[in-house]
Protein backbone atom coordinates (compact mmCIF):
# COMPACT_ATOMS: atom_id res chain seq x y z
CA UNK A 1 0.00 0.00 0.00
CA UNK A 2 1.33 3.42 -0.89
CA UNK A 3 0.67 7.13 -0.72
CA UNK A 4 1.89 9.54 -3.39
CA UNK A 5 3.01 13.11 -2.87
CA UNK A 6 3.21 15.27 -5.99
CA UNK A 7 5.40 18.36 -5.87
CA UNK A 8 4.35 21.61 -7.47
CA UNK A 9 6.78 20.88 -10.31
CA UNK A 10 5.19 17.48 -10.95
CA UNK A 11 7.83 15.31 -9.23
CA UNK A 12 6.19 12.35 -7.58
CA UNK A 13 7.24 10.71 -4.33
CA UNK A 14 5.59 7.42 -3.48
CA UNK A 15 5.98 6.21 0.08
CA UNK A 16 4.86 3.02 1.82
CA UNK A 17 1.65 3.40 3.76
CA UNK A 18 2.04 2.79 7.48
CA UNK A 19 -1.15 2.58 9.49
CA UNK A 20 -1.06 4.73 12.61
CA UNK A 21 1.18 7.45 11.21
CA UNK A 22 -0.13 10.80 10.10
CA UNK A 23 0.13 11.94 6.53
CA UNK A 24 2.69 14.53 7.66
CA UNK A 25 4.85 11.83 9.26
CA UNK A 26 4.78 9.85 6.00
CA UNK A 27 6.15 12.88 4.17
CA UNK A 28 8.87 13.52 6.73
CA UNK A 29 9.94 9.88 6.93
CA UNK A 30 9.85 9.60 3.14
CA UNK A 31 12.03 12.73 2.83
CA UNK A 32 9.41 14.38 0.67
CA UNK A 33 10.49 17.98 0.08
CA UNK A 34 7.95 20.69 0.79
CA UNK A 35 6.45 19.43 4.04
CA UNK A 36 8.09 21.10 7.00
CA UNK A 37 5.86 20.13 9.89
CA UNK A 38 7.42 22.79 12.09
CA UNK A 39 5.06 22.41 15.04
CA UNK A 40 5.41 18.63 15.16
CA UNK A 41 1.80 17.97 14.29
CA UNK A 42 0.00 20.25 16.72
CA UNK A 43 -2.15 21.97 14.07
CA UNK A 44 -0.31 25.18 14.94
CA UNK A 45 2.11 26.05 12.14
CA UNK A 46 0.44 25.27 8.83
CA UNK A 47 3.69 24.07 7.22
CA UNK A 48 2.24 20.68 6.38
CA UNK A 49 -0.28 22.07 3.90
CA UNK A 50 -1.27 19.68 1.10
CA UNK A 51 -4.03 19.56 -1.49
CA UNK A 52 -5.87 16.27 -1.71
CA UNK A 53 -6.69 14.94 -5.20
CA UNK A 54 -10.43 15.22 -5.78
CA UNK A 55 -10.76 11.50 -6.36
CA UNK A 56 -9.45 10.86 -2.84
CA UNK A 57 -11.13 13.56 -0.80
CA UNK A 58 -14.14 11.43 0.15
CA UNK A 59 -11.81 8.98 1.93
CA UNK A 60 -10.81 11.57 4.49
CA UNK A 61 -12.43 12.66 7.72
CA UNK A 62 -13.49 16.30 7.28
CA UNK A 63 -11.19 18.94 8.81
CA UNK A 64 -11.84 20.11 12.36
CA UNK A 65 -12.64 23.76 13.03
CA UNK A 66 -9.11 24.19 14.33
CA UNK A 67 -7.67 22.82 11.09
CA UNK A 68 -10.02 24.96 9.02
CA UNK A 69 -8.99 28.16 10.75
CA UNK A 70 -5.29 27.36 10.33
CA UNK A 71 -5.86 26.58 6.64
CA UNK A 72 -7.71 29.85 6.14
CA UNK A 73 -4.44 31.66 6.91
CA UNK A 74 -2.62 29.95 4.04
CA UNK A 75 -2.15 32.07 0.93
CA UNK A 76 -2.47 29.04 -1.35
CA UNK A 77 -5.51 27.71 0.47
CA UNK A 78 -8.11 26.07 -1.76
CA UNK A 79 -11.09 23.77 -1.36
CA UNK A 80 -8.98 20.63 -1.30
CA UNK A 81 -6.46 21.98 1.22
CA UNK A 82 -5.66 19.95 4.31
CA UNK A 83 -3.06 19.92 7.04
CA UNK A 84 -1.20 16.65 6.64
CA UNK A 85 -0.56 16.33 10.38
CA UNK A 86 -4.29 16.15 11.04
CA UNK A 87 -4.83 13.14 8.78
CA UNK A 88 -4.38 9.78 10.48
CA UNK A 89 -3.60 7.15 7.89
CA UNK A 90 -5.48 3.86 7.81
CA UNK A 91 -5.54 0.96 5.31
CA UNK A 92 -8.33 2.66 3.43
CA UNK A 93 -5.93 5.40 2.33
CA UNK A 94 -4.04 3.07 0.00
CA UNK A 95 -3.46 4.96 -3.22
CA UNK A 96 -4.01 8.39 -1.68
CA UNK A 97 -2.59 11.19 -3.83
CA UNK A 98 -1.85 14.63 -2.43
CA UNK A 99 -0.27 17.66 -4.04
CA UNK A 100 2.14 20.03 -2.41
CA UNK A 101 1.75 23.79 -2.66
CA UNK A 102 4.44 25.84 -4.39
CA UNK A 103 5.69 27.18 -1.05
CA UNK A 104 5.16 26.24 2.58
CA UNK A 105 4.72 29.41 4.59
FE1 LIG B 1 2.19 22.12 12.11
FE2 LIG B 1 0.72 20.38 10.73
S1 LIG B 1 2.75 20.16 11.36
S2 LIG B 1 0.14 22.32 11.45
Image (cartoon, rainbow, N blue to C red):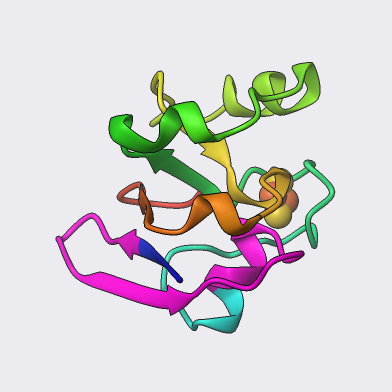
The quarter holding residue 61 reads top right
Is 7 a magenta residue? yes
Q: Is residue 105 left or right of residue 34?
A: right
Decide: is 44 above or below 100.
above
Foreground residue among 103 and 19: 19
Q: Position of residue 80 (x, y in %)?
A: 41, 27
- Can residue 48 be seen? no
Boundaries of the magenta span = 5-27
Foreground residue among 92 and 72: 92
Q: Position of residue 52 (x, y in %)?
A: 40, 39
Q: Is residue 29 left or right of residue 95?
A: right
Q: Is residue 38 left or right of residue 14?
A: right
Name the residue at 71% across, 28% down.
67
Q: Position of residue 20 (x, y in %)?
A: 76, 64
Decide: is 8 above or below 51.
below
The tally of labels here is 0
Q: Quadrant of the N terminus?
A: bottom left
Name the residue at 52% across, 63% down.
35
Is 73 a magenta residue? no
The quarter holding residue 29 reads bottom right
Amino acid sequence: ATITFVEHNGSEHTVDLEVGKTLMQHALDGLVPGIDGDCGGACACGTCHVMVATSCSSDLVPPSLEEQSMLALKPEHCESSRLACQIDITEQHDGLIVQLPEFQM
